Amino acid sequence: MPRQTVAARRADVEGGPAATAALATAALAAVAAGARRRALRDGDRQLDTAHLLHSLVESDPQVGPAFGGQAQLARVLGYLVQRSIGYGLRWQRSVEDSGSRCVVREAEAAAAGWSPSAATALARAWERAALRGDPHVRGLDLLAALTADPDCRAVEVLRRAGVDPLVLADRIDELSQQV
């Protein structure tokens, strides 16, 4: 089973979207680049899990069906858009650290402009792909990794939009078996 080495994972976190593009699908590279642009545009110090969720939901067509309907997906996007224009959830210019056990060093993540929680989510997405025997991370892998951290910003957005992260995780698993 192919496994991404710690060095490769570290290079991905340090290199951000450019390194992601070398190892991931084009869709995941677009998600990472979009999340980085969103963080910069919003004036946030670091790319966080909500940036990743926003970019993922907007750009990866395989993720939409996991939400169980357009109404739920629209509510999630509504919360994310409110956040990006300065309403709703207030995290701007603060560092996200949900306290989950990071699989990459915090200093490396911060130096690359990723919150510890976002870096951990990306590393967990790689692990999920490796368990499947796939050298590439899919959007569903990243969505599953985001939902696995109950204290991250992405899960807070999901809950406020009426999405149960456990139900979403089950749908992701079902869809992942079909892909």
Image: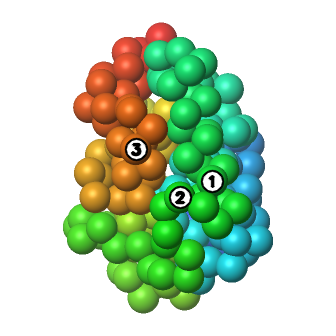
| Disc 1 crowd, CA 10 A, few/some/many (<14, 14-19, 20+) | few
* Residue of label 1: 82
Q: Which of marks 1 and 2 is nearer the N terminus?
A: 1
| Disc 3 crowd, CA 10 A, few/some/many (<14, 14-19, 20+) | few
Circles 1 and 2, Cβ within 8 Å, touching? The answer is yes
Q: Which of 147 and 177 is in front in this view?
A: 147
Residue at left offset 36%, top offset 80%: 105
Q: How much space separates mark 3 and mark 1, taking CA atoms?
A: 12 Å
Mark 3 residue type: Arg
Circles 3 and 2, Cβ within 8 Å, touching? The answer is yes
Q: Which of marks 3 and 1 is nearer the N terminus?
A: 1
Q: Assign a secondary structure to mark 3.
A: helix
* Residue of label 2: 88
Residue at left offset 69%, top offset 39%: 58
Mark 1 residue type: Gln
Q: Is residue 78 left or right of residue 152?
A: right
Mark 2 residue type: Gly
Residue at left offset 35%, top offset 59%: 152
* Circle number at residue 20: none
* Residue of label 3: 160
